[in-house]
Image (tube, helix red, strand yellow):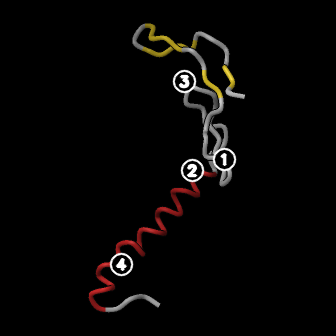
Amino acid sequence: MLPTGSSRKRVAPLFFAIEPMASIIGALESMKNYDTGLMAPLSFAADRHAGALSGAITKAQGGKWKIISGWLSAE
């Protein structure tokens, strides 16, 4: 049951913010192997919020980032 009167005015913004937040979280947790071009592909899940578990050494060259090493794993 939703609150009524002045309580509803205070609570309504919080109540209606839950749905957009849930859809954002759901979208992020469905990301699999997203390639950023600068790091290992990112994957997220309900039980995995770390994103990338490896990275690479990069340098600026010609106004762009260039990967100059292989992937370095955190494992």
- How many angstroms separate mark 1 from mark 2 (CA)? 11 Å
4 and 3 marks in contact (CB < 8 Å) = no
Q: Which mark is residue 12?
A: 4
Left or right: residue 18 compared with residue 37: left
Tag 4 or tag 1, which sits nearer the N-term? 4
Q: Are marks 3 and 1 in contact (CB under 8 Å)?
A: no
Q: Secondary structure at mark 1?
A: loop
Outermost left residue: 6
Residue closest to the far right:
75
Mark earlier in primary sequence (3, 1): 3
Mark 4 or mark 3: whose residue is earlier in sequence: 4
Q: Given contact means CB atoms under 8 Å apart, are the residues at marks 2 and 4 in contact?
A: no
Crowd rating for badge 1 (residues with CA inside 10 Å; few <14, some 14–19, many 20+): few
Q: Residue 16 appears at what percent x and percent y?
A: 41, 73
Q: For the residue labelled by badge 4, is the local secondary structure a helix, a strand or a loop?
A: helix
Residue 47 sits above or below residue 5 on the image: above
Q: Position of residue 63 (x, y in %)?
A: 40, 12
User: Of the residues shown, which amino acid type is indicated by label 3?
Assistant: Leu
- Give percent across and percent down for residue 62: 42, 8
Q: Earlier in the sequence, mark 3 or mark 2?
A: 2
Q: Mark 2 is on which residue type?
A: Leu
At x 44%, y 11%, the residue is: 60
- Residue where numbered disc 2 is placed: 28
Q: Amino acid at mark 1?
A: Arg
Type of the residue with mark 4: Ala
Label 3: element kind: loop
In the rendered view, tell whether residue 18 sits above or below residue 49: below
Name the front one of labels 1 and 2.
Answer: 1
What residue sits right under mark 3 in the picture? Answer: 38
Instruction: Pick whichever, 26 or 49, lies toward us.
Output: 49
Whether tag 1 and tag 4 are in contact, CB under 8 A, the answer is no
**Residue placed under numbered mark 1 in the picture:** 48
